[in-house]
Image (cartoon, rainbow, N blue to C red):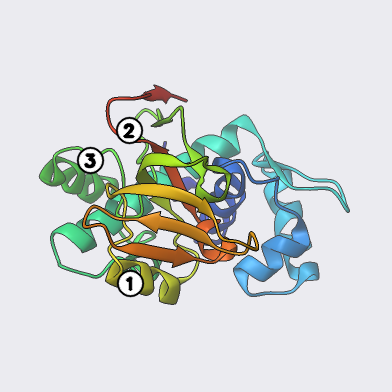
Amino acid sequence: MDLSEITPVAQDYLKVIWAATEWGGPPITATALAARMGTTTPNVSDTVKRLAAQGLVEYQPYKPVMLTERGEKYAIAMVRRHRLLETFLATTLGYPWEEVHDEAERLEHAASETMIERIEALLGNPATDPHGDPIPTATGQISRSINATRLTHATPGDYEIIRISDADSSQLAGFRRQEIVPGAIVNVAGAGPHQDRVLLTDADGKTIVLTPEQAGVIWVAPSPGVGGSTPL
């Protein structure tokens, strides 16, 4: 998949449209795209119409934007590039995980496919990025835990944190300080007395209190030894 065949703007749009539904969210609307891209709804509509004319999306006014099969292939190629760059920045250059998203956004359009392949080889073909999002293979295959659930939906028990949304960098910084990161094993004690808190206990026995909003951006799976992953 040669990403140079489409413009950087198209690359950004396809990646955002694809990512909206990756973890079970609804298809994205033009209004939500405008908020995500920092522009106006009329500008988004014009751009999406151009993408539709290129056979990359399916679009009807007042309905969510959907990727075509061709558009999805470009989107996954961009997601792969972005997440490998995030991983390289964090593991090789020492960036904190709350900074890698924006930096990767700036780099992903300039990096050649040869550079991306060499980064992947250097990193030992990582399966996930620093936030726990799966990194697509060169052929577009993606593996994700079959037992993944939002922390807000987890019943009491032991879990491994597998993914945390990177949408809010300041929130990520706070999670890092509390050692709430992918790979951490936690015990979910359940909601607080008024159902407005989620209580965790970490490996050191420390109790961590999260709001539902904070817990809603964290995905967990039963602790190692239970469950598995499946290719998508």
Horizontal side, residue 170 vs residue 59: left or right: left
Q: Secondary structure at mark 2?
A: loop
Residue 159 coordinates in the image, percent (x, y): 37, 41
Q: Residue at x 61, y 43 (%)?
A: 21
Above-or-below relation of 10 to 97 = above
Residue 57 coordinates in the image, percent (x, y): 69, 42
Q: Residue at x 28, y 72 (%)?
A: 177
Estimate how packed mark 3 is, as few (under 14), some (14 to 19) or many (20 or more) residues with alpha carbons within 10 Å: some
The quadrant of the rendering that contains the N terminus is: top left
**Closer mark to the observer between disc 3 and disc 2:** 3
- Going by the picture, which residue comes out furthest to the front? 193
Q: Residue at x 52, y 40 (%)?
A: 155
How far, Cα to Cα, is label 2 from label 1? 25 Å
Circle 3 is placed at which residue position?
126
Residue 3 shows in the view: no
Please name the amino acid that badge 1 sits on.
Glu
How far, Cα to Cα, is label 3 from label 1? 19 Å
Q: Secondary structure at mark 3?
A: loop
Q: Secondary structure at mark 1?
A: loop
Above-or-below relation of 131 to 52 = below
Residue 37 coordinates in the image, percent (x, y): 61, 68
